[in-house]
Amino acid sequence: QKEVEQDPGPLSVPEGAIVSLNCTYSNSAFQYFMWYRQYSRKGPELLMYTYSSGNKEDGRFTAQVDKSSKYISLFIRDSQPSDSATYLCAMSLFSGGYNKLIFGAGTRLAVHP
Amino acid sequence: NAGVTQTPKFRVLKTGQSMTLLCAQDMNHEYMYWYRQDPGMGLRLIHYSVGEGTTAKGEVPDGYNVSRLKKQNFLLGLESAAPSQTSVYFCASSPRGGATDTQYFGPGTRLTVL
């Protein structure tokens, strides 16, 4: 079983929809939870990170962490065609002297006009 | 300020050939990383470096070697390429290795091994 599970999609929504992206994890030692966005043929870029259970908002994006259920979510409000990308969740664990990141496989999102 | 750059962008190799992928960063970051990305697998760490002259193994190091002779450069070598090494390779760098030190990724190198 993978440490981080993420539905690969694809997820197709109309412009303006609320998008919900999710990941589950098995290692309760994970400390930080991140969401990366990856456009086609580009490298991932960090969108948001959270530390504790609860919500964190940044513009149209809200990251939610439920440590008791080992479940994290990313909500995108008023989705735009420019949000079309693959979204990767990542969890961090301090190991071997550095912050080790474990990535989900990514969910491909398409927002159509 | 170019961030993280990778050379080459694409490469096709035959089984048994060797090659070196170059990563360069201009942000004076201490830590650098090499990942591979395969469909359905997510990003997996191959090797990393916590500073000039140091390297360490990541999750999937077999078949790869790395060197960090200069702080700004991190090289990934394939001595004898195999079809299983067909993948997209990403380099990343971060200021240090702390939990809040963002990893900045390069644009990737698409490698096909025939």
Image: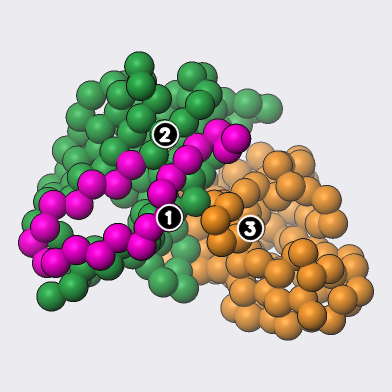
Chain colours: A green, B orange
The residue pinned by badge 2 equals: A24
Q: Nearer the viewer, residue B101 or A109?
A: A109
Say what secondary structure mark 2 lies in.
strand
Kindly indicate whether the residues beneath marks 1 and 3 are on one polypeptide chain. Answer: no
Instruction: Tell me which chain the residue with mark 1 is part of.
Output: A
Q: Pointer 3: what residue? A: B36
- In x, y percent, where is residue B76? 75, 61
Q: Residue at x 63, y 64 (%)?
A: B89
Q: Seen from this angle, which residue lies furthest top? A: A68
Residue A14: percent from left, percent from top = 14, 67
Say which element carries label 1: loop
- Could you say where residue B95 lies in the image, as x and y percent from the top left? 50, 42
Nearer to us of marks 1 and 3 is 1
Circle count? 3
- Callouts 2 and 3 on one subunit: no
Q: Which region shows up in magenta? A: A1-22
Alpha carbon separation for disc pair 2 and 3: 22 Å
| Residue labelled with disc 1 | A8
Kind of residue sitting beneath label 3? Arg
The CA distance from mark 1 to mark 2 is: 13 Å
Q: Quadrant of the C terminus of chain A?
A: bottom left
Residue B91's x, y, as percent?
59, 58
